[in-house]
């Protein structure tokens, strides 16, 4: 993952946005309104105050006409004023007078470099209407001085995806500015390619040090998958952290996935998995790459692409791996959009 020393102005701008949104509330109350109920954090979350979640919702409000957002600061001021006036059921009166239709509860979790947001949307007028879904974002910004994550963009993106999935509108943010033009992509874990060597052919150094070569293969697959912008792809660190949750250690990138890995992927609701083979042949080495759907007990191959490595160099391997990854994702797009 890319590590960038973020400029303080990014945080300041979001805080300024959060402080200024009160002026827009009255204009927006003719729309179906949403407000935040509660925000919960997983144990791995650091330095993420609630005002950033509030600011992210205010920013998301600008990118969609599906709903309006009533900010937390203004809501608390109104409810506090109603309580001081001895108004009974102050929250109910607030929601009625401000056309609040939905409460959004958020739970925010982190798995190494992946930020996950679970949204619970509750209809105030009809308590039987409760919807839950999740969204993910890449945590690729870090404050290297203070050694903490910078959540702002990843948080907003993950919340956007959770909202889009809950509202069943995968293109609701297609007109947003570039950093926030997100789609509700499925999660994908990059696995290794099974190495298949042969004594029939001249020795290839790429097969001699399988550990180093296979690691490079997985890195190259991840880099191209990230670039292709069709999945939320777990990098090696995040994938291995996922396996650690299930006490799975010593995963080798040159072996086929084990039943224990598949169980972990399924329980963590990972959507897709990349795997395949790297096989020595007379003309060099053949790459066969699959995008698989993760089922409860197995992998279902969805699309496959092949490539060749005709030179025994890491540079030739990287080029072919990235080309093959690009092709297999293109096939996935042709099939699913």
Image (cartoon, rainbow, N blue to C red):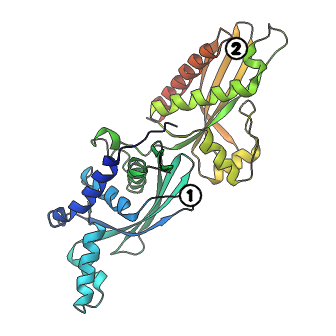
Mark 1 or mark 2: which is in front? 1
Decide if residue 27 is on the left or right side of residue 49: left
Q: Position of residue 199 (x, y in %)?
A: 85, 12
Outermost residue, front side = 145
Residue at 49%, 36% in the rendered image: 2
Q: Nearer the viewer, residue 13 or 302?
A: 13
Give the residue at mark 1: 44
Q: Nearer the viewer, residue 242 or 8?
A: 8
Decide if residue 281 is on the left or right side of residue 85: right
* Label 1 Cα neighbours within 10 Å, binned few <14 / some 14-19 / many ≥20: few
Element assignment for label 2 = strand
Residue at 30%, 81% in the rendered image: 91
Q: Position of residue 271 (x, y in %)?
A: 57, 45
* Label 2 Cα neighbours within 10 Å, binned few <14 / some 14-19 / many ≥20: many
The correct choice, above or below, for 174 with respect to 45 in the image is above
Asked if marks 1 and 2 touch (Cβ < 8 Å), the reply is no
Q: Position of residue 58 (x, y in %)?
A: 28, 58
Indicate the quadrant where residue 182 lies. Answer: top left
Decide if residue 196 is on the left or right side of residue 307: right
The correct choice, above or below, for 81 with respect to 38 in the image is below
Instruction: Classify the position of the C terminus by image quarter.
Output: top left
Outermost residue, right side = 199
Indicate the quadrant where residue 207 lies. Answer: top right
The answer to whether residue 171 of the structure is visible from this angle is yes
Real-space Cα separation, disc 1 to disc 2, in angstroms: 41 Å
Which circle's residue, 1 or 2, is located before the other in the chain?
1
The answer to whether residue 66 of the structure is visible from this angle is no
Give the residue at mark 2: 285
Residue at 24%, 54% in the rendered image: 65
Q: Which label sits on residue 254?
A: none
Q: Position of residue 336 (x, y in %)?
A: 47, 36
């Amino acid at each position: 993952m890319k590590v960038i020393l973020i400029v303080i102005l990014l945080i300041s701008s979001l805080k300024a946005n959060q402080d200024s949104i009160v002026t827009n509330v009255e204009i927006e109350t003719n729309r179906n309104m949403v407000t935040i109920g509660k925000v919960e954090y997983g144990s791995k979350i650091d330095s993420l105050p609630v005002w950033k979640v509030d600011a992210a919702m205010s920013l998301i409000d600008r990118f969609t006409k599906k709903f309006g957002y009533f900010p937390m600061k203004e809501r608390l001021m109104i409810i506090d004023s109603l309580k001081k006036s001895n108004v009974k059921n102050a929250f109910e009166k607030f929601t009625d007078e401000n056309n609040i239709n939905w409460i959004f509860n958020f739970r925010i979790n982190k798995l190494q470099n992946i930020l996950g947001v679970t949204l619970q949307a509750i209809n105030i007028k009809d308590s039987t209407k409760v919807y839950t879904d999740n969204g993910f974002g890449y945590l690729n910004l870090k404050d290297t001085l203070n050694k903490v994550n910078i959540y702002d963009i990843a948080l907003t993106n993950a919340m956007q995806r959770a909202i889009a999935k809950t509202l069943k509108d995968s293109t609701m943010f297609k007109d947003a500015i570039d950093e926030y033009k997100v789609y509700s992509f499925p999660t994908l874990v990059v696995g290794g390619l099974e190495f298949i060597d042969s004594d029939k052919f001249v020795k290839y150094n790429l097969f001699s040090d399988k550990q180093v070569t296979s690691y490079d293969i997985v890195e190259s697959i991840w880099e191209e998958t990230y670039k292709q912008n069709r999945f939320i792809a777990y990098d090696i660190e995040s994938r291995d952290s996922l396996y650690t949750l299930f006490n799975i250690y010593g995963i080798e990138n040159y072996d086929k996935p084990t039943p224990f890995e598949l169980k972990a992927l399924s329980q963590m609701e990972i959507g897709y998995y990349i795997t395949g083979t790297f096989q020595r042949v007379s003309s060099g080495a053949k790459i066969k790459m699959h995008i698989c759907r993760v089922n409860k007990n197995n992998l279902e191959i969805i699309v496959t692409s092949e490539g060749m490595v005709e030179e025994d160099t890491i540079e030739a391997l990287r080029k072919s791996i990235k080309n093959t990854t690009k092709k297999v994702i293109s096939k996935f797009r042709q099939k699913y959009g």
